[in-house]
Amino acid sequence: MSDTSSCIFCKIIRGELPCTKVYESKELIAFMDINPMNKGHVLIVPRQHAETLFDLDNSIAEPVFRAMREIGRAIMIATGADGLNVIQNNGEAAWQQVPHVHWHLIPRFRGDGYKPWGQKKYDTLEEMQDLASCIQKQL
Ligand code: AMP
Ligand code: ZN
């Protein structure tokens, strides 16, 4: 979807929907996730409406990286977290619900009950190496 008129994050950016803001700059806005994975969960949202990471301009990289570090550090201090996940989902298959690219900053606490993501095995070393060369060829 590339329709900014119905995009909920564009509506938040335009001030048409409320949010609990923690930071904003000319490139991005950061606000509290309304359904946090843990309390203190913040979303970093570029002002540019782009559906996924692959639709964004490279110029956003530096402001987003800076925001991740500065807001991430602030979340950890404010919540007393033991760790912090930065997660960014692209496409429904990768759990993206809101089609306006964003980064999740999620404070983590020892014993907070979340399991590590699942892990699979390659059938053979060759299978892994073949896939690596397929990826390399696309670069
Ligand atoms: P994703 O699955 O990566 O697209 O994540 C979307 C996130 O946006 C979810 O964690 C939602 O809880 C969050 N979310 C959806 N609507 C709002 C809203 N109006 N204000 C704050 N967070 C929201
Ligand atoms: Zn949008």
Image (cartoon, rainbow, N blue to C red):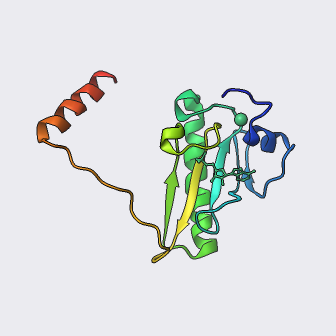
Measured from the top left, where is residue 123 in percent x and y? 16, 43
Q: Quadrant for the N terminus, please.
A: top right
User: Splitting the image into 4 quarters, where does residue 10 fall?
Assistant: top right
Q: Residue at x 84, y 47 (%)?
A: 17
Which sits in the foreground, 17 or 136?
Answer: 17
Measured from the top left, where is residue 102 in percent x and y? 61, 44
Is 138 above or below relative to 10? above
Measured from the top left, where is residue 60 in percent x and y? 60, 36
Which sits in the foreground, 93 or 83?
Answer: 93
Measured from the top left, where is residue 94 in percent x and y? 48, 42
Number of numbered discs overlaid on the protein picture: 0
| Picture quarter with ligand 2 | top right
Q: Is residue 126 left or right of residue 113?
A: left
User: Splitting the image into 4 quarters, where does residue 63 fall?
Assistant: top right
Is 25 above or below relative to 50? below
User: Splitting the image into 4 quarters, where does residue 25 fall?
Assistant: top right
Q: Residue at x 80, y 30 (%)?
A: 5
Which sits in the foreground, 36 or 64?
Answer: 36
